[in-house]
Amino acid sequence: SLSTLWQHFGCAVRNMSSEGTAILFAEKEHFDEYKMMKEKRKQREMPSSQNKQKAVAITNNVPPVSTRIPTGDEQSNCSDASDEEIGVSNILNQQCHENNTMNGKQLWEKMQVPREKANINQPRHKTSQPTGLEPGMDYLINADVCPGIGCQRKVLDAVFENETAESDHHKCNTSLKTGCLWYLITPPKICCDIHTPEHFTSFMSIIPKHTKQPSCPHITKFSMASIDFKLVDVLEDWREDTTQKLYGQAHLHDLGPSLVMPNDILNRIVDCAHFHKIKSPTDLLKETHWSGVDEHGDDIVALILQVSPLPSPSTPFISTPL
């Protein structure tokens, strides 16, 4: 709930002379921008007749799109938006901030009901609690695009009725002329990332979407020979010694040698070594996708070639005496 969230935000700093910054992480499904782009994708997939019927409803019900992208995932999901859509979003977002005229009482009355029916999902059983966002949390996340708000702190002031609160710091300490400074309600120097975005630039980051690595080549089934079991023992001894050397005996006892090399990577190395597929650290990375190749690749390749050396190349012409 918003009350619990505000309690956690208050733990950021307690000294009145210090400054704290609170950051709220929310799933992309709660942002109006994602809902708008998702609705547009559905609209493109619908037949043209149904598309025309829902065009008016979508325009009237869906809030304007925000130009602020909270995470890198949302940027990748909205990459299919055209330049015309982005231009319209900028105009609507600018109008939203210009019409920031809703006071705290009007906003509090508006937050008594959800903005959308999909925000609060009713439980299937009577004993269950409803799931979804409460209206106050919904307005806080989408304050930059909700008409008449344009400020995240305005949502908090409306929920907790801060505009009607009176400071009683003089009653707390009557001996001082200034009263008790701990109970003095002081206006914040920094409002939110909507009004003071330059203060939050250090926290903004775009997470790049990594390309999926190709799957490992297929290995045909085979029966392990004595040399394969020997390689298993050698790799087991190596990862136990390496785990103890890097992390100590306690981590080796508690977490095991898989901390350095997982079991599936070890089994994959043995399978590839049976068919002599690993001849260099590059081959080891290609066949296993192991994250420790850069640090331990040379040692593993040396152990493989020591236990299972490469077969000598056969010459095409063999000279025999007459």
Image (cartoon, grey):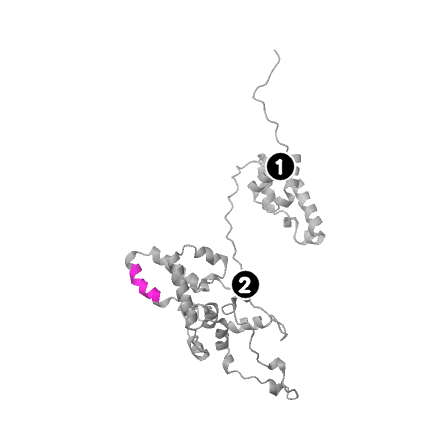
Residue contact at pointers 2 and 1, CB within 8 angstroms = no
> Is residue 128 in view?
no
Q: Which residue is mark 1?
A: 228
Q: Nearer the viewer, residue 295 or 166?
A: 166
Asked whether residue 191 is drawn in magenta, I would say no
Instruction: Give x and y (percent) for residue 103.
Output: 44, 78
Quarter of the image holding residue 119? bottom left
Amino acid under label 1?
Answer: Asp
Label 2, label 1: how far apart the Cα atoms are: 55 Å
x 39%, y 66%: residue: 92
Which residues fall within the magenta stretch? 50-59
Q: Nearer the viewer, residue 285 or 148?
A: 148
Where does residue 124 sit, x and y in percent of width and height?
42, 67
Task: Say whether residue 236 is visible.
Answer: yes
Does 156 sit above or below residue 89?
below
Asked if residue 171 lies left or right of residue 68, the reply is right
Q: Nearer the viewer, mark 2 or mark 1?
A: 2
SS state under label 2: helix
| Residue 12: quarter of image | bottom right
**Label located before the other in sequence (2 or 1):** 2
Q: Badge 2 is on which residue?
A: 201
At x 43%, y 61%, the residue is 34
Main SS, magenta region, reads helix
Amino acid residing under circle 2: Thr
Q: Looking at the rendering, in which quadrant would you find the C terminus? A: top right
Whether 53 is among the magenta residues is: yes
- Residue 109 higher or lower than 90, as above or below: below
Determine the secondary structure under disc 1: helix
Q: Position of residue 157 (x, y in %)?
A: 50, 77
